[in-house]
Image (spheres, rainbow, N blue to C red):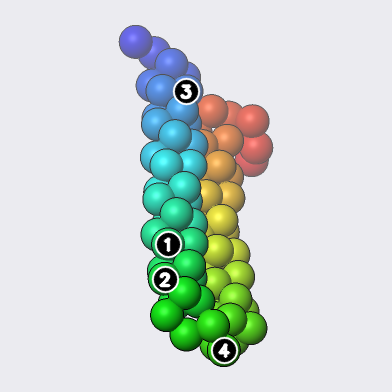
């Protein structure tokens, strides 16, 4: 295998694991939000803000994985 082929393999693995990690993170955060709102409905607004911050951080990690994958494939700088 040439170096470029290994870079493409690494890029695919990086994007895949990044997407899986973000999916698990958002799923766990959603589960926690639903449990918190079902136990104490009066904190729904405050809990939703923290959920959105957590979901954004999880998606940021997926975007970083995408950028790393694209660099490995050679599509960006």
Q: Which residue is mark 2?
A: 35
Place of residue 42 in the rendered image (x, y in percent of width and height, measured from the top left): 57, 89
Look at 47% across and 74% down and name the residue there.
Answer: 38
Q: CA gap, disc 2 to disc 4?
A: 13 Å
Question: In this rendering, which labeled residue sits more in front, label 1 or label 3?
Answer: 1
Q: CA gap, disc 2 to disc 3?
A: 41 Å
The quarter of the displayed image where residue 71 is located: top right
Look at 58% across and 30% down and name the residue there.
Answer: 74
Q: How many marks?
A: 4
Specify whether 64 is left or right of 9.
right
Q: Which residue is mark 1?
A: 31
Q: CA gap, disc 4 to disc 1?
A: 17 Å
Look at 65% across and 37% down and name the residue there.
Answer: 76
Q: Is residue 12 above or below residue 48?
A: above
Q: Which residue is mark 3?
A: 8
Q: Residue furthest left?
A: 1
């Amino acid at each position: 295998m040439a170096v470029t082929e290994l870079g493409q393999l690494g890029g695919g693995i990086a994007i895949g694991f990044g997407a899986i990690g973000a999916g698990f993170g958002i799923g766990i955060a959603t589960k926690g939000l639903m449990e918190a709102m079902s136990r104490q409905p009066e904190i729904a607004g405050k809990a939703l803000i923290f959920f959105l911050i957590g979901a954004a951080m999880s998606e940021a990690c997926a975007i970083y994985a995408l950028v790393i994958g694209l660099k490995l494939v050679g599509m960006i700088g």
